[in-house]
Amino acid sequence: MGLSFTVRFWPCISYKTKDQFHIEMNSQNYEHSTKKIVLVQTATNVNMILNFGRNLTELIKQSDIEYHVIYSKNQNKSNESVIAGELENLNATLHTVPLKQELSLKSLFGLFSSFLRIFLLLRKIKPDVLHTRGTLMGIIGRAAAFFARVDRVFHHQDDFYHREDTLSPARKRIFKTLEKLLAKTTTKLLFVSETIKEEAIEIGIPEHKCINVGHDLHPIFIQHLSSEVRRSDLINKYMGSNSEKFIVGTLSRIEEFKGIDTIVAVAKKVQQQQADIKFFVRGTGSKFEKYQRIIQEEALSDTIFLTKDYLPTEEIPPLFKSFDVFFLPTRREGFGMVFAEAMSMGIPVVCPKIYPVVEVVPNDMGCLIEAEDVEGYTNAILSLYHDEQKRSMLASKAREYAIDRWGGKKSAQLVLDTLIH
């Protein structure tokens, strides 16, 4: 069944001054007029706006744009007050939906409720531009925008849901088809890596709709470039006297595709050869309790320290600087920003040789190991432990590279220019 489209009038936008955008009405029935651009931004997880999208929100705040944010009240409940404070600082009109980060039959009612809420909000706000982030919000938000007749719809494609290895072939085909249909209603798709952009073109999304906008480091990392190197309070809290040991750190969602099982396997091998190496893993996710139990069952409680404690954004760079090595044997990434963050803080990384991670970590900027090679990961960590000069060389080169490539707001500026021009 094909999609039908209604052709509607859309004004041509041109940049006139720093703080003002003129809408030139291309019709003899309209006189030239001036009004603010109305931008609605929404994401499956509000962290995509507050963290990964922080540079973009800062640019929006500096522009004469009427800014609205639609976010889920069911996300980040454990740190609700902190999230609320950060959202207030966006200088945006805030709207909530009941969306849960779940795609299943039992979540259908919640998904429909969110779709209806977003549809009604869009009809009320009448935005010039809708910008969605996250796979689930990209589906719900773009569908609502189509029925609400929003002219300019942009989706930030951090990853594709059909890349999830646990999905059956039939479900993968369904989500590929859905993405192609949604692309027809989307003005442009904004990709964070060339890998995901190529995946889009491969499944049949028109190339002219695809833009690789890349990523920026959160500004908090730039602010901490010269900060003191010390063990963070979180490390001291959970590791006690072990905080003085050699620390292999991980910041990640606790999910199977992130390779948490591989971290456990590597830690077990390392423990047998060098007891002074400790692993610190911070993250949340559906598999947290599972791996908490596995660590105890494998007698690794004195080797792997796992926590899901919330950290405010300003505490993330000091946590990275607490690590001697950053290690994440992920099986799938949309970009791999966590590697760029570690590199910018002068921490050598051990990572899988997979796309798009290799777009972030060049061969001479870290230890790239064949995916699933537990022995290779183990040897890389032991090598870095024994060779301080190698660690220092890697850290220095990678830090300079990361700051040069992802420092500033190049990606955010490209996104904003694409959204409003």
Image (cartoon, grey):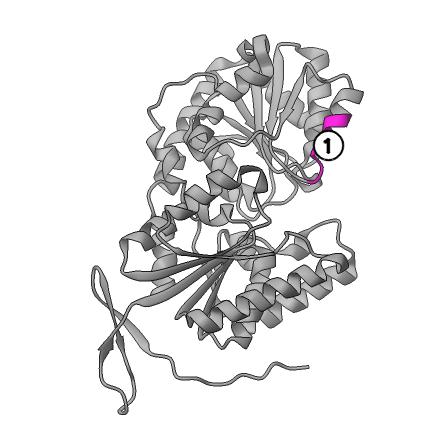
Q: Is residue 265 above or below residue 65?
A: above
Few, some or many residues within 10 Å of mark 1 (<14, 14–19, 20+): few
Question: In front: 265, or 283?
Answer: 283
Quadrant of image for the N terminus? bottom right
Give the residue at x 42% y 72%: 126
What amino acid is labelled 1 in the image? Glu
Residue 220 picture location, percent across and down: 38, 35
For residue 350, side relative to residue 35 (left or right): right
Give the residue at x 33% y 32%: 223
Question: In front: 75, or 41?
Answer: 75
Q: Residue furthest front?
A: 81
Quadrant of image for the C terminus? bottom left
Q: Which residue is mark 1?
A: 289
Residue 368: in magenta span: no
Residue 74 picture location, percent across and down: 60, 49
Residue 235 picture location, percent across and down: 54, 19
Q: Residue furthest top?
A: 241
Residue extent of the magenta highlight: 286-293
Q: Is residue 185 visible?
A: no
Q: Is residue 236 above or below residue 204?
A: above
Q: Is residue 130 visible?
A: yes
Residue 366 picture location, percent across and down: 51, 30
For residue 227, side relative to residue 138 (left or right): left
Q: Residue furthest left?
A: 17
Q: Main secondary structure of the magenta part?
A: helix
Give the residue at x 49% y 52%: 192
Image quadrant assignment for residue 66 = bottom left
At mark 1, the secondary structure is helix
